[in-house]
Image: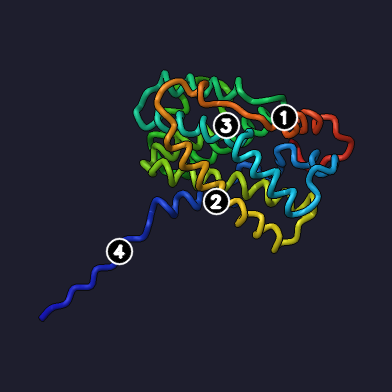
């Protein structure tokens, strides 16, 4: 009797997602705090509980939630090869940034993401779809969605990885700004888990149509905080 052992293939999709969302993927995320630096100085974020509350607000009905909407529609357009729809989402992503610093953060990371993805991702469909957008700035969630779609990664997985990366970056900023210890940082990330998974589920359920109708938000203090950060006297972060 001959026994054949079958070893499951490694999860290549997961490997690529971890690579693209890793701190080793050089997009300069460490230089941005999404206005959190102002929130700490103003006394809105002072400990683990207030850090978590701030992040949950952004995930549920703030800038991060809108980035998920833009990611979702860009992903669908890129996967379908619909250049017109993709260009419209890209334009909307720039127009919907609240203030100069939010736009700076998104486009700076987007430009860095494009540079490294062209060289190191190995996804052939990425460069042509980005180039089809024209010689314009591109928002980070849009270009990330193009890469993930070009790699044929499942939307829910792509959203989860991208959102985990976005939240992790803010937790890292909070560890330096509040400051939070390493344990409190990881506990904060864990406490955001349910909200992250819920946000991904909601994004996947968005109907086809105009992404503008899915955008919205009610985190006025966070948006004003990004604007106030532009003139903050002492700054460690670009945003």
- Percent across and percent down for residue 60 are 59, 39
Q: How many marks?
A: 4
Q: Which mark is residue 220?
A: 1
Q: Which residue is identified by label 3?
A: 66
Q: Residues within 10 Å of mark 3 (few under 14, many from 20)?
A: many
- Percent across and percent down for residue 46 are 81, 50
Q: Which mark is residue 185?
A: none
Q: Which residue is identified by label 2?
A: 194
Q: Is 131 situated above or below 184?
A: above
Q: Which mark is residue 8?
A: 4
Residue at (80% x, 42% y) in the render: 44
Q: Residues within 10 Å of mark 1 (few under 14, many from 20)?
A: few
Q: Residues within 10 Å of mark 2 (few under 14, many from 20)?
A: few
Q: Earlier in the sequence, mark 4 or mark 2?
A: 4
Question: What whole-number distance in Å separates the C-alpha atoms at marks 1 and 3?
Answer: 14 Å
Q: Earlier in the sequence, mark 4 or mark 3?
A: 4
Question: What whole-number distance in Å separates the C-alpha atoms at marks 4 and 3?
Answer: 37 Å
Task: Label 2: state its secondary structure.
Answer: helix
């Amino acid at each position: 009797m001959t026994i054949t052992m079958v070893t499951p293939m490694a999860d290549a999709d997961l490997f690529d997602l971890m690579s693209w969302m890793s701190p080793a993927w050089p997009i300069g995320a460490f230089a941005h705090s999404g206005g959190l630096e102002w929130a700490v100085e103003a006394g809105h974020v002072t400990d683990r509980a207030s850090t978590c509350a701030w992040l949950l607000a952004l995930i549920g009905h703030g800038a991060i939630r809108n980035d998920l909407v833009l990611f979702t529609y860009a992903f669908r357009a890129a996967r379908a090869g619909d250049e017109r729809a993709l260009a419209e989402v890209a334009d909307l992503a720039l127009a919907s940034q609240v203030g100069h610093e939010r736009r700076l953060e998104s486009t700076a990371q987007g430009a860095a993401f494009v540079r490294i993805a062209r060289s190191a991702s190995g996804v052939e469909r990425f460069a042509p779809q980005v180039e089809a957008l024209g010689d314009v700035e591109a928002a980070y969630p849009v270009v990330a969605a193009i890469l993930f779609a070009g790699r044929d990664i499942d939307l829910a997985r792509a959203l989860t990885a991208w959102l985990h990366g976005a939240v992790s970056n803010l937790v890292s900023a909070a560890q330096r700004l509040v400051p939070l210890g390493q344990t409190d940082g990881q506990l904060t990330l864990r406490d955001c888990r349910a909200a992250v998974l819920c946000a991904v589920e909601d994004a996947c359920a968005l109907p086809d149509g105009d992404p503008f109708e899915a955008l919205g938000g009610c985190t006025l203090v966070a948006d004003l905080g990004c604007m106030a950060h532009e003139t903050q006297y002492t700054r460690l972060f670009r945003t």
